[in-house]
C-alpha cells in the first residue's frame, strides 16, 4: 500500500490554468465540420457548433493555439480576412482550404469560449514582415493600414492577441520551409524584433525541441526577445501506420514521461534564462495523427493513399482508458513542473485525436475529455510537494520490446489558495488490480469525496449512443489519518478533502 505524505507549507507553486490549454489546426475535420459548420442546424448565427463551444467552456479552455501545426508553414493570413476569400491549396495537407475561417473567425470563437488566443505564425514560407503585419492587424488601435483593414472588416476594437509563436516544428524535414539551426536563430530574432516593435506587450515563443545545438543557436541569438520556448511531443508516433500501442505499451510511455521538460529546464538554467523564459508544451498527445504518405519523400498519389485514411483518426473505439490514464499522468507531470512549464496545448481539441468528436447530430466526449474535466474542475490551484513510501511498481514491455519498471500509482497533491482543503490526483496504471493509498497526514474535521474516471475494462470507450467512460462520484465520509482509499484498476481519481462547514 502506497503511503502519501504531504506538508501543506511546501508549495511547488501555483499551477497555471494555461497548463490545460488546447490546439486546433486546419487538418481534416478539426475546423470545417468540426468547430465551424455554418450549414449545421446545431451552429449559431456565426457558424460555430454550439454543442462544441459548450463542451469547451465546461473544461474552461484557457488558451487555444491556431492555425497550426504544419498547416501554418504555407498559410498567408491576409488571404483569409475581409469579404473576398479565395480558396487555396494547402501544401502541407494537400487539400483545398476555402479560407472562410480566418483570423477574425478564430478570435470570435475564442471570445465565445472565453479563452486567450495563441497565434502561430508562418515561419516556413512567410517573412518577418508578414508576421509583424499580422500583429498590426490584431493589436494596433488604428495606426497603419492593417489596423484600418481590421476596422473596415467590422472589428473596431483591437483583438489584443497576447500570445504568439514564431513557427511550428521548423527543425523537421517534414515542415514546409524547414530551416537549419543557424538560419532559424536569425529569422526568429528579426521576426521578434519587428513583432515587438508593433506591440511590446506581446509574449513570444519560438519552435524548439530537445536538441542542444538547435536550442543554443535559438537562445543565444534571441533569448532576450523570447518569453517562451515551444516543445512538442507525441509518444506513440503512428503517423504512417495507425498501429496503436496497446494498454501495457502505453504504460511504458509513462517511464520518464517528463524527459523533455527536464532537458529543456536544464539548458535554460545553464544559460541563466530560467527566470525569463518558460516552457510552452504547446503540442502534445499520446498518439501522433494518422496522415500516411504526406510528410514523406515519396508522396501518395491517389486520395485513397493519402487523404481518405485520415478518417481512421475518428474511430471512437480507439480512444480508451489507455489514452485517459496516459493523459492524466502527463498532466500530473506538467503540474509538478509548474515552476517552469507555464502553458501546454493538447493537440487537437476537436476530432482527429481530440477529446471532442463531432457528427451531424451531436458530439461524443471521449475518455480524455473527462480527464480534463477532472483536472480543471476538481483539483486545487496550488501544487504541493509530496513524498511517498512503499510505492508499488509495474513491469511493462514497451512497443520496442524494452522491459521497463514504472510506478503503479502516479500522485499529485494540490490545495486551494487561502484554504486548507486538499485535492489529490491519483492514477492507478495497473490494468487489472485494485490498488490502495494511505493518506498519511492530518486533515482534521474534514470530509472525503472521490471522483473517478475508469470504465469496465482497459478497452472502455465512448461513441455515438455508447458511453462507458465518465466521472463517478463516491462519498468516503470523515477523514481519518492513515485512512486507506481503494482505487479501481486503470483509473484516474481525484480525492477531495474539504473542511466541514461551520
Image (tube, rainbow, N blue to C red):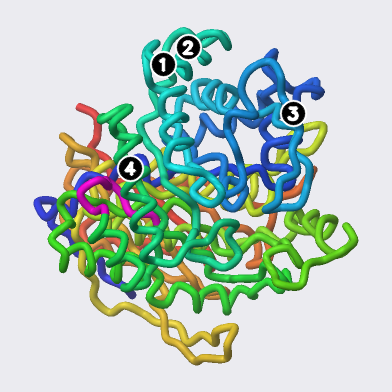
Which residue is under mark 4?
A: 192
Q: Residue at x 22, y 69 (%)?
A: 266
- SS at circle 1: helix
Q: CA distance from mark 2 to mark 3?
A: 21 Å
**Considering only vertical position in the picture, is 484 above or below 166?**
below
In the drawing, what numbered circle is on residue 148? 2
Q: Nearer the viewer, residue 65 or 436?
A: 65
The residue range painted magenta reads: 222-230
Indicate the secondary structure of the residue bearing disc 3.
Answer: loop
Q: Are marks 1 and 2 in contact (CB under 8 Å)?
A: yes
State the residue in front, 9 or 345. Answer: 345
Q: Residues within 10 Å of mark 2 (few under 14, many from 20)?
A: some
Earlier residue among tags 3 and 4:
3
| Mark 4 burial class by Cα count in 10 Å: few <14, some 14-19, many 20+ | many
* Crowd tier of the residue under label 1, counting other residues whose Cα lies within 10 Å: few below 14, some 14–19, many 20 or above: few
Residue 81 is left or right of residue 377, and the answer is right
Q: Position of residue 81 (x, y in %)?
A: 61, 23
Lower position in the chain sequence, tag 2 or tag 3: 3
Tell me where residue 32 appears, x and y as whole percent.
73, 35
CA distance for labels 3 and 4: 29 Å
Question: Is residue 477 something one can see in this rendering?
Answer: no
Label 1, label 2: how many angstroms apart (C-alpha)? 6 Å
Which mark, by number, is residue 86?
3
Q: Which residue is mark 1?
A: 144
Nearer-N-terminus badge (4/1): 1
Give the class, few, some or many, for how many residues have Cα within 10 Å of label 3's Cα (few <14, many ≥20).
few
The mark lying in front, picked from 4 and 1, is: 1
**Mark 4 and mark 1: Cα distance apart in space:** 19 Å
Q: Is residue 481 magenta?
A: no
Q: Mark 2 or mark 4: name the one nearer the start of the chain.
A: 2
Point out residue 50 in the picture as x, y percentages from the top left corner.
Answer: 66, 23
Q: Comparing marks 3 and 1, which lies closer to the viewer?
A: 1
Amino acid at each position: 500500500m502506497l503511503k502519501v505524505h504531504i506538508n501543506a507549507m511546501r508549495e511547488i507553486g501555483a499551477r497555471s490554468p494555461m497548463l490545460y490549454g488546447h490546439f486546433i489546426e486546419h487538418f481534416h475535420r478539426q475546423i470545417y465540420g468540426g468547430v465551424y459548420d455554418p450549414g449545421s442546424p446545431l451552429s449559431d448565427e456565426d457558424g460555430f457548433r454550439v454543442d462544441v463551444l459548450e463542451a469547451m467552456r465546461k473544461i474552461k479552455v484557457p488558451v487555444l493555439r491556431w492555425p497550426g501545426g504544419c498547416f501554418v508553414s504555407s498559410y498567408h493570413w491576409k488571404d483569409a480576412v475581409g469579404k473576398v476569400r479565395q480558396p487555396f491549396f494547402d501544401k502541407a495537407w494537400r487539400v483545398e482550404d476555402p479560407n472562410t475561417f480566418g483570423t477574425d473567425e478564430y478570435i470570435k470563437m475564442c471570445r465565445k469560449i472565453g479563452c486567450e488566443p495563441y497565434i502561430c505564425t508562418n515561419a516556413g514560407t512567410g517573412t518577418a514582415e508578414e508576421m509583424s503585419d499580422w500583429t498590426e492587424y490584431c493589436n494596433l488601435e488604428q495606426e497603419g493600414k492593417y489596423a484600418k483593414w481590421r476596422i473596415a472588416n467590422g472589428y473596431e476594437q483591437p483583438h489584443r492577441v497576447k500570445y504568439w509563436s514564431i513557427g511550428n516544428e521548423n527543425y523537421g524535414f517534414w515542415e514546409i520551409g524547414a530551416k537549419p539551426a543557424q538560419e532559424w536563430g536569425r529569422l526568429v530574432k528579426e521576426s521578434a524584433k519587428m513583432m515587438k516593435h508593433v506591440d511590446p506587450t506581446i509574449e513570444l515563443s519560438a519552435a524548439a525541441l530537445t536538441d542542444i545545438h538547435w536550442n543554443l543557436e535559438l537562445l543565444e541569438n534571441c533569448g532576450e526577445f523570447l518569453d517562451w520556448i515551444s516543445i512538442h511531443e507525441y509518444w506513440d508516433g503512428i503517423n504512417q501506420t495507425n498501429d496503436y500501442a496497446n494498454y501495457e505499451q502505453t504504460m511504458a510511455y509513462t517511464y520518464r514521461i517528463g524527459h523533455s521538460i527536464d532537458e529543456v529546464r536544464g539548458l535554460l538554467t545553464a544559460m541563466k534564462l530560467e527566470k525569463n523564459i518558460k516552457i510552452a508544451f504547446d503540442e502534445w498527445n499520446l498518439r501522433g495523427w494518422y496522415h500516411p504518405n504526406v510528410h514523406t519523400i515519396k508522396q501518395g498519389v491517389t486520395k485513397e493513399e493519402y487523404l481518405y485514411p485520415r478518417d481512421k483518426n475518428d474511430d471512437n473505439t480507439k480512444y480508451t482508458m489507455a489514452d485517459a490514464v496516459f493523459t492524466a499522468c502527463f498532466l500530473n507531470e506538467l503540474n509538478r513542473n509548474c515552476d517552469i512549464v507555464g502553458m501546454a496545448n493538447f493537440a487537437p481539441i476537436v476530432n482527429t485525436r481530440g477529446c471532442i468528436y463531432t457528427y451531424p447530430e451531436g458530439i461524443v466526449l471521449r475518455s480524455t475529455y473527462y480527464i480534463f474535466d477532472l483536472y480543471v474542475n476538481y483539483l486545487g490551484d496550488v501544487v504541493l510537494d509530496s513524498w511517498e513510501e512503499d510505492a508499488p511498481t509495474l513491469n511493462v514491455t514497451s512497443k520496442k520490446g524494452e522491459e521497463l519498471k514504472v510506478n503503479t500509482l502516479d500522485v499529485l497533491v494540490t490545495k486551494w489558495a487561502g484554504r486548507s482543503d486538499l485535492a489529490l490526483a491519483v492514477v492507478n496504471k495497473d490494468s487489472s488490480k485494485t490498488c490502495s493509498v494511505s493518506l498519511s497526514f492530518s486533515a482534521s474535521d474534514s470530509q472525503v469525496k472521490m471522483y473517478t474516471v475508469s470504465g469496465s475494462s482497459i478497452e472502455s470507450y465512448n461513441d455515438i449512443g455508447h458511453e462507458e467512460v465518465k466521472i463517478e462520484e463516491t462519498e468516503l465520509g470523515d477523514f481519518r489519518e492513515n485512512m486507506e482509499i481503494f482505487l479501481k484498476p486503470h483509473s484516474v481519481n481525484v480525492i477531495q478533502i474539504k473542511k466541514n462547514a461551520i
